[in-house]
Amino acid sequence: MRFKMLYITAIMLVWTTFVQAQQALDIIRKDPSFAVTNYALYPDSIDYPMTAAPAGKRPFYLSHYGRHGSRYINKRMGYDIPYFMMCRADSLGQLTPTGHEVLRQIREIIADSELRWGDLTGYGHLISRQIAARMVKRFPELFEGDASVYARSTISNRCVLSMASTMLELMKYNPNLKTWIDASMYTMWYMNHQDSLLSWKGMTPAAKAAHEAYEAKLKGNPYLMKLLFQNPDSVQKVIDERQLNYFLIKMGLFQLHTHLYKSGYLTDIFTAEDLYRLWQDDNAWWYIQYGACKLNGGHQPYSQRYLLRQIINDADSCIRLEKPGVQMRFGHDTVILPLVCLMGVNGYDLETDNLEELEAKGWMSSAIFPMSSNIQFVFYRKDPEDQDVLFKVLLNEQEAWLPIATDCAPYYHWRDFREHYLKKINDYEQLRAEEKAKQNQEAQK
């Protein structure tokens, strides 16, 4: 029986990898925002099929971690870099008519973003409400009568506002819900933990060399230089071709999250292939920093071990209740990405030292953490006395797969999940304690 369970899981993982491995370039042709990785748009229309639960099992608890919705960029530096380059070229009389139009658009974008750095946009509010509405539609049992909904956010205003939009939408469907919200430094240790040691180890010399070699062929764009400048060769002293190309693409795609999206700002001067090269570069960078990359030891996903342990502990407590309801958490991209990698959702625990094979093996960061990305654990049982609690994972509202055995995929036995992942966390913490003890011993010599 155990072999059968493992076989079924292996088949599911192979199928998922096959689905993920569609070419990123094809996706970008349909959705240009996919190219900008953590600024990818969350779709505003979703109708993913759901697999029926095993006989007699009903949803009774939902545990959630979601990224805030669409926002403006955090700092104006990403806009200043192309802006000052274009201004210098303009002062030299080197801009073409297209160059002048691009500079005008840059000024308009900066003016619109001023004092809104990092703020949630209207689209961010919209998607938060839509996700909440689909939760109610898919799992009405969890939102009936005086059901409880507990929501917690990091102290970032875009996360707080995403939480607020979600809760208001839920209250619209059922004003009798018992709701509780919070945003405090008190819970930031697991809601938005940034592991300084792992961050320091992220870009090792080996990882840096591999990334620099990988990106060397991706950032230039001679055609763009000819399009914007009368004499491209003469502006080389004031224009960094790679940086201009990189930040102009991002600047254009960022606007897809704002009210300026209808004008197609800046994106029309780039081809799908241009966007694809940007995506390759960023995708590799995110993998090195937050994936199980062999170039830096493969431990980066463990930055979210505290969050995963908290999710497990919260679930263990709620399972004991007769009517636990819903727990929601609102945070950030640098949390949800390593969390997904730590759990190996849909094969995102990929370990490799070859950046060239990421796409072929289905590791596409944009599919994990677009704006409003979320992971939902939906728990099922027959009644409060049922000891065989099942659950399934939804990544961005799609049924997902885990690297643990099951006989009822995409559902898993909660006891198997908690045993597997608590051991994984404990093993890493033991390894880290041993490394620290060894360092202390060496320091005392």
Image (cartoon, helix red, strand yellow):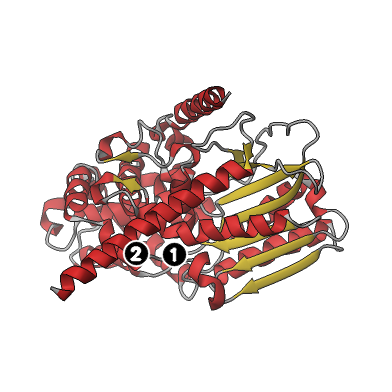
Residue appearing at x 55%, y 77% in the figure: 186
Pointer 1: what residue? 73
* Residue 272 x/y as whole percent: 37, 38
What amino acid does circle 2 point to? Gly
Residue appearing at x 52%, y 54% in the figure: 371
Residue appearing at x 17%, y 75% in the figure: 444
In whole angstroms, how far apart are the C-alphas of marks 1 and 2?
Answer: 8 Å
* Residue 78 x/y as whole percent: 34, 64
Horizontally, is 114 left or right of 394 in the view? left
Q: How many marks?
A: 2
Q: Earlier in the sequence, mark 1 or mark 2?
A: 1
Residue 101 appears in view: no
User: Badge 1 local density, few (<14 within 10 Å), some, or many (20+)?
Assistant: many
Residue appearing at x 46%, y 73% in the figure: 114
Horizontally, is 390 left or right of 375 in the view? right
Quadrant in which residue 81 is drawn:
bottom left
Q: Are marks 1 and 2 in contact (CB under 8 Å)?
A: yes
Q: Secondary structure at mark 1?
A: loop
Q: Nearer the viewer, residue 387 or 361?
A: 387
Quadrant in which residue 152 is drawn:
bottom right
* The N terminus lies in quadrant: top right
User: Badge 2 local density, few (<14 within 10 Å), some, or many (20+)?
Assistant: some
Quadrant in which residue 167 is drawn:
bottom right
* The C terminus lies in quadrant: bottom left
Q: Nearer the viewer, residue 111 or 255?
A: 255
Residue 339 appears in view: yes
In the rendered view, tell whether residue 27 sits above or below residue 313. Answer: above
Horizontally, is 444 left or right of 161 in the view? left
Q: Secondary structure at mark 2?
A: helix
What amino acid does circle 1 point to? Ile
Q: Which mark is residue 78?
A: 2
Q: Nearer the viewer, residue 181 or 266?
A: 181
